[in-house]
Image (spheres, rainbow, N blue to C red):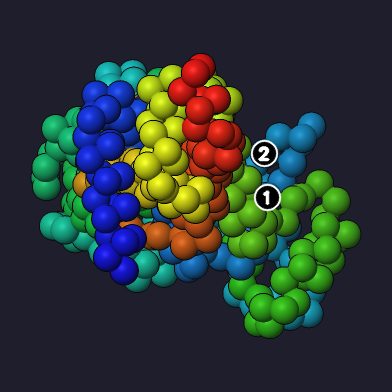
Amino acid sequence: MIKHLKILEFALSSLWRRKFKNLGLIVVFSLIIFTLSSIVFLTYSFKREAVAVLKDAPELIVQRLSAGRHEMMPVEYMKKIKDIPGVGKIVPRLWGYYYDISTGGNYTVMALREGLQDKISLMEGSFVVGSGSCVVGRGVADARFLDIGSIMPLIGADGKVRRFRVAGIFTDESNLLTNDLVIIGEKDFREVFRIPQSIATDIVVQIYNPTEVDNIARKIKEALPDTRPITRREILRTYDTLFDWRSGMVLTMFLGAILAFVILAWDKATGLSAEERHEIAILKAIGWETSDVMELKFWEGFIISSLSFLTGLIGGYLHIYFFGASIFSPALKGWSVIFPEFRLVPYINIYQIAVLLFFTVIPYMAATIVPSWKAAITDPDVVMRG
């Protein structure tokens, strides 16, 4: 044990003698780990947030398509859907997008429907949405400087300005769902967007048996060929694919930095400096075994790689969960002007951390040990003579 501790002590002193070179190596290595870990943490947290948000989403949503695009749906479609065995309650929904020219943001405007009050809590005000009143998200309230009792103007499809009094503002905790949301009454919604009573945006279908969701979706498609049934599982799968694609896009942006690390590791693997070879030759000449030299280089590589890995990993964690992922979140959140400001809940995937460790630390360790082994098995006299 004393022998191993002495080798570790010598490894620390050896690293300190080349402190500026090793410090530069640690900085580069840490930045690579920071980039990769930030993307991994952010992508995984977004996926978990999507699962948490969509856990109360409808099991089945039916939309109408025209030329492959979403179209408004006749309410009479509900009769054919209701006749399918296993279908429970059917609720038509009214929602759409409103571009606010004063802020340059797109709002999601939704008509109040039954049961919506039970799903979302308010920080202040009430959820009583009557004629001429509305409930807005925190992002809309901040963008328009609104408070309880303020007036929220909306320009209708007929060009007329309709004014709504703010009855409530959603809590910060619900920002992921409600940040850009405006809820008004059904009558007001139809007047603003000029939608007749016989039309709805889509239909929410309750399924008694969750295992029959796919089967009922197929039957709805057969009965109404111009519709597209969307299950909750399909929405979750879409979010997974979307965040995987965006994380890949961000990784591509940092491909140059990753390649720089690969080149650095390759340069480390192709050979040692003359000073390092002479040091190994001297150690061999004074009686060190090849195994002792290998242990020395193992500790040097382990110290640098583990310190860099922990520094980059902790930096990525702090960046995502304490500083709001300010570097990468715009690329992964999307294009909306009114971003939901929310604090991600820390989710650590041990498998992803292990993969990150395997593809960064292990190659560096191998790149450190292999050339040292080649120098250690060479005759010291040959090495000293150059």
In the displayed structure image, the side of residue 237 where residue 178 appears, left or right: left
Q: Residue 29's spot in the image, x, y percent? A: 39, 33
Q: Residue at x 67, y 39 (%)?
A: 70
Q: Amino acid at mark 1?
A: Gln
Q: Quadrant of the N terminus?
A: bottom left
Which residue carries the number 2 mark?
70
- Using residue 291 as the reference point, say whether residue 183 is left or right of it: left
- Residue at the image position 68 percent from the left and 82 percent from the top: 209
**Where is residue 12, by image quadrant?**
top left
The percent position of residue 303, horizontal first and vertical second, equals 33, 46
The residue carrying pointer 1 sits among few (fewer than 14), some (14 to 19) or many (20 or more) residues within 10 Å by Cα, namely many
What's the mark number on residue 236?
A: none
Structural crowding at the residue carrying mark 2, measured as other residues with C-alpha within 10 Å and reported as few (<14), some (14–19) or many (≥20): some
Residue 139, x across and y down, in percent: 25, 39
> Horizontally, is 36 left or right of 174 in the view?
right
At label 2, which amino acid type do we have? His
Element marked by disc 2: strand
Q: Residue at x 72, y 79 (%)?
A: 211
Q: Which residue is mark 1?
A: 63
Quadrant of the rendered image containing residue 214: bottom right
